[in-house]
Amino acid sequence: MSSAVCRRVLQTAGSAPAASSSSWSRIVSSCCSRLRAEPRNEARRGMSVSGRGNMNVFNREMKKRQKNWAASLQDGHHYDYLRDEVGCRVADRVYDIARTFPLALDLGGGKSHIAEHLSKEVVERVFLTDVSEKTLKQTRQSEMPVHRVLADEEFLPFKENTFDLVVSSLSLHWINNLPGALKQIHQVLKPDGVFIGAMVGGETLYELRCSLQLAETEREGGFSPHISPYTAVTDLGNLLGQAGFNMLTVDTDEVQVHYPGIFEVMTDLQGMGESNCAWNRRSLLHRDTILAAAAIYKEMYGNEDGSIPATFEILYMIGWKPHESQAKPAKRGSATASFGDLSKIGQPTNTNKS
């Protein structure tokens, strides 16, 4: 199977990848599960060592260079398949809201992977921001006017109460101060405005992470983080609530992409501009370690046709800025019926015949 074909084999993952049936694979799989559960050398998102403030996990200047490099590739459009898929799913969630948004902000929108799926009947005007200037120059055509703004997602250059809608797709996972970024999104939204976003979750690329950890441990006696630390779905609702959003919706989805081998996985991640930019990353991998990781990847997760899966966990979030017109919960104790009474509905009643 060619790399070009494998790159486009996307599917919703309903079950875990099948591992080899050999006893060696079962032992390694058990070890890998422990490594995933207790990543001793990997930083946790959104926490400092003392538990206060936020960690400076990512080199934002490095991420800017990575995205600029990816945007300069002549065949860069071949690596947009994941962003196109997730952008389409975010646009579907915008269509689920029965209203027209006069002004929207696409945060970290890149080539406009969301706006190209929207119509001017739903969104009248869009501001598109990205940290990469070269990426903004490749913005795709859409029905509504699009204004491109070179801006860092961590420092939004907009006034409060500006936008009716803010969307974001696959960019927030590189933010150092995610709680602060969500608060800024809340500020630039108008009252009763809505934020709809998608970001990769903690189980993303677990196959690649485990394979590299096991290979590095076996060949070098220890491992270092090669995959970025991601936000857990259990933390996302709390972060949105702390930022001031209400009427929250958080759901997850899994997208699997099948590749010929581990080298194609890494090549595509680089072409997406999704290489690791954590400060504590290792810049190089030994040749023996890479070859061992490729063998472990195929042994543990390989498919019958020789390809290997790469799983992307996508976290979708929806939050509204409070407004007096929004539905509010009733006061405690104001109910006129109990759950006990509701359980009796539909039950036959006994009648005494004289």
Image (tube, grey):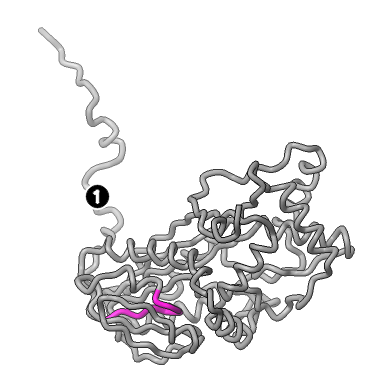
Left or right of 341, for residue 300: right
In magenta segment, residue 338: no
Q: Count the labels in the image.
A: 1
**Residue drawn at (46%, 64%), measured in percent from left and top?**
237
Identify which residue, 353 or 103, lies in the foreground.
103
Q: Residue at x 56, y 61 (%)?
A: 4
Q: Quadrant of residue 326?
A: bottom left
- In this view, the residue in front, 306 or 337, is 306
The amino acid type of the residue labelled 1 equals Ala
In the rendered image, which quarter is residue 258 located in?
bottom right
Task: Give the main secondary structure, helix, strand or loop, of the magenta stretch.
Answer: loop
Left or right of 105, for residue 192: left
User: Magenta residues?
Assistant: 103-112
Residue 292: quarter of image:
bottom right
55, above or below 85, in the image: below
Measured as percent of width and height from the top left, residue 102 is found at 22, 79
Residue 100 placement (x, y as % from top left): 20, 72
> In percent of the image, x 30 and y 79: which residue is there?
104
Q: Under tag 1, what secondary structure?
A: loop
Residue 258 sits above or below residue 186 on the image: above
Q: Measured from the top left, where is residue 250 in percent x and y?
A: 43, 60
- Residue 105 counted in the magenta span: yes
Q: Is residue 142 left or right of residue 30?
A: left
- Quadrant of the image containing the C terminus: top left
Residue receiving disc 1? 335
Q: Residues within 10 Å of mark 1 (few under 14, many from 20)?
A: few
Give the image location of residue 229, x and y in percent.
Answer: 64, 69
